[in-house]
Image (tube, grey):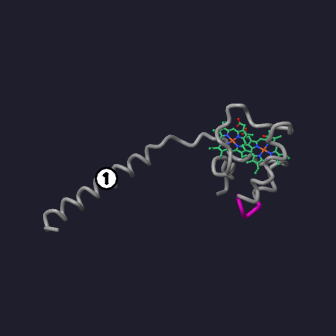
Amino acid sequence: MKRKNIFFANAAFFIVSAAILVFLLRAPEETTSSLPVNENHRRFFSMESKKEAEKHCGECHAPGMTTPLPQDHPPKYRCLFCHKRNME
Ligand code: HEC
Ligand code: HEC
């Protein structure tokens, strides 16, 4: 590549990177409820593996259990990717 082309490639890369950074920084605040800190959920905070912890959510949050998910709940695999454990 010619020097001039390299300069323009670098400039374009810089501008695109800056635009993405600005876009990410302007993202709205997270609104999804985090994992509650209470008797029902305390044990999940000490589990290292999210996957391991998520195996137990259905004991209560499934149809016919004590606290089923709302009808309009988004796709639900990997609970803890959306409902964060707050100290993470
Ligand atoms: C032993 C039963 C039980 C288990 C197991 C359980 N939950 Fe819950 N969960 C509840 C109950 C009851 C409520 C509603 C009252 C409350 O906030 O604790 C609730 C509420 C919630 C809420 C709503 C919090 C809010 O602010 O409205 C989220 C999110 C949640 N649970 C996620 C999870 C996830 C993720 C798991 C698995 C890691 C899980 N729960 C496992 C019983 C359970
Ligand atoms: C793609 C993201 C996502 C995933 C994955 C997910 N949820 Fe949710 N969940 C939400 C959103 C958004 C709501 C709407 C209310 C809110 O902001 O908490 C919600 C609502 C809930 C509620 C109702 C309480 C409330 O705050 O209204 C419970 C309980 C819950 N989720 C548990 C779970 C469990 C258990 C799993 C895994 C089986 C799971 N969620 C997976 C995004 C998610």
Name which quarter of the figure residue 72 lies in: top right
Image position of 63 (left or right of 23): right
Q: Position of residue 45 (x, y in %)?
A: 75, 57
Left or right of residue 69, residue 3 in this image: left
Any atom of ligand 2 within 8 Å of the CB at mark 1? no
Q: How many circles with numbers are drawn on the protein?
A: 1
**Hey, which quadrant is residue 88 in on the image?**
bottom right
Q: Residue at the location (68% across, 44% down)? A: 76
Which picture quadrant has residue 75? top right
Where does the N terminus fall, quadrant-wise? bottom left
Question: Is 49 colored magenta in this rendering?
Answer: yes
Q: Which residue is mark 1?
A: 16
Q: Nearer the viewer, residue 51 or 46?
A: 51
Q: Amino acid at mark 1?
A: Val
Residue 76 appears left or right of 9 = right
Residue 31, position as x, y percentages in the image: 60, 39
Is residue 88 found inside the magenta-colored segment of the image?
A: no
| Vertical comparison of 58 with 17: above or below | above
Residue plotted at (18% across, 63% down): 7
Assess disc 1: are there few (<14), some (14-19) or many (≥20) residues with their C-alpha within 10 Å of its C-alpha.
few
| Residue 48, x across and y down, in percent | 73, 64
Q: Secondary structure at mark 1?
A: helix
Q: Nearer the viewer, residue 40 or 67?
A: 67
Depth order, front residue of 82/87:
82
Residue located at (47% from left, 43% from top): 27
Q: Residue reaching furthest top?
A: 71
| Dominant secondary structure, magenta | loop
Q: Is residue 40 above or below residue 6?
A: above
Ligand 2 falls in which quarter?
top right
Stretch of the chain drawn in magenta: 46-50
Q: Which residue is located at x 33 percent, y 53 percent? A: 18
